[in-house]
């Protein structure tokens, strides 16, 4: 099983600042099948990025993904108030098919 | 647009079977893969398993012995049954669509299930 480790656990920033979230895999992620999601209480989770760097439909261009192999990054170039949430990375593999990181909480400083 | 909605009992007794349904609108269930994911209180996301319209399923090994996912094409729904539940199965349960076997592009809002006597 590929284990994903996200850092930091909590990130405290102000609106307008740049956020950089990290996701490291215990083994190389095949096909760069690495996705990022945003979770807010009471809302449906939102797909942001898939295959490491492809923005999902309707996602603002301030969100970008990068990386390959075992190291991946989600960058939010200029934080908007609605961006403060919990972010999860997810990889697709053999068994189990989907595994998630433990999450990074992005909070208002 | 594509929408998913989970439904089912919010309270299940220990040792009983949890049953949830995901109603899909805006797209036929006879395409794509359809997953169940859960999030226990204060914890991260855990993928439970998925089903293809043909009936092909794949489960997380940690839950494979207790989980069953099925599809009802006539109702455009898919379902989860989780047997012999304990307090550790208390979670928000989500259903989601997998368009091509590597990510989950549309999710339901989730339904909270509590296991308690």
Image (cartoon, rainbow, N blue to C red):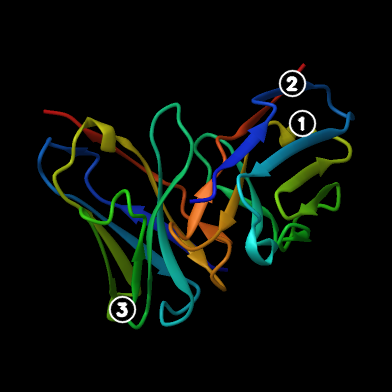
**Looking at the image, which is closer to me, A56 or B82?**
B82
Question: CB under 8 Å between callouts 1 and 2?
Answer: yes
| Residue underneath mark 2 | A108
**Looking at the image, which is closer to me, A71 or B80?**
A71
Is A102 located above or below residue B109 in the figure?
above
The image position of residue A106, as x and y in percent, is: 70, 28
In the image, is A87 to the left or to the right of B59?
A: right
Mark-to-mark CA distance, 2 and 3 = 45 Å
Report the residue at 87% width, 33% height from top.
A18
Q: Which mark is residue B82?
A: none
Q: How many labels does the image show?
A: 3
> Is residue A85 in sight in this rendering?
no
Mark 3 lies on a secondary structure that is loop
Report the residue at 45% width, 72% height from top.
B33
| Residue underneath mark 1 | A81
Give residue A73's quadrant in the image.
top right
- Residue found farthest to the front: A27
In the image, is A87 to the left or to the right of B60?
A: right
Q: Which of marks 3 and 1 is in front?
A: 3
In the image, is A24 to the left or to the right of B28?
A: right
Question: CB under 8 Å between callouts 3 and 1?
Answer: no
Is B62 located above or below residue B79 in the figure?
above
Tag 1 and tag 2 share a subunit: yes
Mark 2 lies on a secondary structure that is strand
Mark 1 lies on a secondary structure that is helix
The image position of residue B25, as x and y in percent, is: 45, 70
Tag 3 and tag 1 share a subunit: no
| Residue underneath mark 3 | B55
Q: Residues within 10 Å of mark 2 (few under 14, many from 20)?
A: some
Q: Nearer the viewer, mark 2 or mark 3?
A: 3
Report the residue at 88% width, 36% height from top.
A78
Q: Which of marks 1 and 2 is in front?
A: 2
């Amino acid at each position: 099983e590929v284990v994903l480790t996200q850092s930091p656990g909590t990130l405290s920033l102000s609106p307008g600042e740049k956020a950089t979230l990290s996701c490291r895999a215990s083994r190389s992620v095949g096909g760069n099948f690495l996705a990022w999601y945003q979770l807010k209480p009471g809302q449906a989770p939102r797909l942001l990025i898939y295959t490491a760097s492809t923005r999902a439909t309707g996602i603002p261009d301030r969100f970008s993904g990068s990386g390959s192999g075992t190291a991946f990054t989600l960058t939010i170039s200029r934080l908007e108030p609605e961006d403060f949430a919990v972010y999860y990375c997810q990889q697709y593999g053999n068994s189990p098919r989907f595994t998630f990181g433990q999450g990074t909480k992005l909070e208002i400083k | 647009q594509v929408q998913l909605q989970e439904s089912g009992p919010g309270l299940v007794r220990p040792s009983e079977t949890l049953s949830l349904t995901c109603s899909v609108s805006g797209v036929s269930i006879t395409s794509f893969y359809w997953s169940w994911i859960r999030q226990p209180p204060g914890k991260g996301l855990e993928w439970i398993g998925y089903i293809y319209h043909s009936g092909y399923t794949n489960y997380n090994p940690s839950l494979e012995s207790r989980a069953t996912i099925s599809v009802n094409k006539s109702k455009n729904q898919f379902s989860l049954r989780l047997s012999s539940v304990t307090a550790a199965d208390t979670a928000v349960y989500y259903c989601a669509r997998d368009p091509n076997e590597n990510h989950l592009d549309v999710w339901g809002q989730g339904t909270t299930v509590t296991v308690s006597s």
